[in-house]
Amino acid sequence: MWSKNVSFESGVLHLSGIPAAKLAQEFGTPAFFLDENAFKSRALAWNNGLRDEFGDHAGTIFYAAKSFISTAVAHWIEEIGIGIDVCTGGELAVALAGGINPARIEVHGNNKSVAEIDRAVVAGVKTIVMDSLFEIERVATAAKKHGKRQAVMLRLTPGIEAHTHEKISTAHEDVKFGFSIASGAAWQAVLKVQEHPELELRGVHCHIGSQIFGSDAHEIATDRLMEFMGRYRDEYKVELPELDLGGGFGIAYVSGDVTVEPSDVLPAIRKAVDAACKKYSLLIPLISLEPGRNIVGPTMFTLYEVGTVKDVVVSAGTVRKYVSVDGGMSDNARTALYDAEYTAVIAQRVSSAPLTLSRLVGKHCETGDIIINEIQLPADIAPGDLIATPATGAYGRSMASNYNHVPRPPVVAVKDGKARVIVRRENEEDLLALDVKE
């Protein structure tokens, strides 16, 4: 759950040797603290793992920007030499501002605007992943307008029920994403792309969901997508050269979870690719993956300060301690959205007090403003204590809001005993900046 440079010395949390109290004093709370070396090592592990497993058939590791992106992170990605998957014009803008080579940018999204498509084509992105027949027409129009031939892929839904939360499962039939193989929509998309010489169909793509453990679902998806690629070869007498199997590899949030490592899944995916190639008489395509949460999630934690504590009698003989911190659903919406589970610790001191049934909540005017629904915390927890919640790198700051007009927290990168702000804390001036004065 904790990144590799987090340690506990006499009960006190340290990141790269810096104690939690010092981090809080310098940067305030709530704040996200990002272990820079851990982020880079996880990204490199996926990149190296893909190359070790697939050799010349290794495509691109695309970091999923939606999990968390900033210009500093984009700069790290460019330095490492991997690609990035963006799904809005804003994410594309950050990627470009961070110096990422457009030739390593993949553009995603189920409803790209005409302006977003135009900018992507002009920028010279590697691939645009098609998600509707309307989009095929729009990308072709933009490519023709700018005198380019744009590489595209088709996002397919292979009809897999991934064992994850309903709201982050994306490859079964009844979803907004992609073209269904079973219904024939996927082949209709192929025919539509063939109408436009401005488009180069490079391959097919799928994303089966998020927070997935094991490789079974990816293996099934591989077979179904490569069967489709075999049909394309039979029809057009040429093979599609690329296959993108998406991401969704799970991470540990609570005790008992185990973060998926590249070595846990890549050998099985390679075997599935080899088996499908043999089954459908295909050459091995370039294989790409899109880990986002798996790279950044375990490398960040959130630091809060306790504001109030109250004991609430919830039933006869049962008391729950409500521990309110200075953040909440504005910096971590996942508990409210997905019933996500987290753990937490007192970060600045050790406690020998007995554990007691607790609920970690935020400061917002919402009953559902819960960070951890049920957790055992020391009974002596009190205002002023620091609380650290691990594994908040993915979909924490990226989903953060200004609910109740709370400024969003900063992101602080820590490396080799030094800390620096890479996304500053918002202030009241930021909150008022968009208001139009009469």
Image (cartoon, helix red, strand yellow):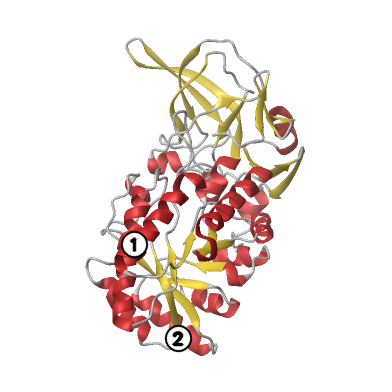
In the rendered structure, the answer to whether residue 99 lies left or right of residue 308 reads: right
- Which image quadrant for residue 273? bottom left
Residue 156: give x, y in percent of width and height. Answer: 34, 66
**What residue does disc 2 label?**
141
- Disc 1: which residue: 276
Name above or below for residue 161 compared with residue 313: below
How far apart marks 2 and 1 lie (CA) works out to: 35 Å
Q: Residue at x 57, y 18 (%)?
A: 381
Left or right: residue 6 compared with residue 127 = right
Looking at the image, is mark 2 or mark 1 earlier in the sequence?
A: 2
**Looking at the image, which residue is at 64% across and 58% down?**
77
Bin the neighbour count of mark 2 within 10 Å (Cα to Cα): few under 14, some 14-19, many 20 and up.
some
Q: Amino acid at mark 2?
A: Thr
Quadrant in which the C terminus is drawn:
bottom right
Can you say which quadrant of the picture contains the N terminus?
top right
In the image, taking residue 105 as reference, residue 110 lies left or right, namely: left
Amino acid marked by disc 1: Ala
Q: Is residue 297 above or below residue 308?
A: below
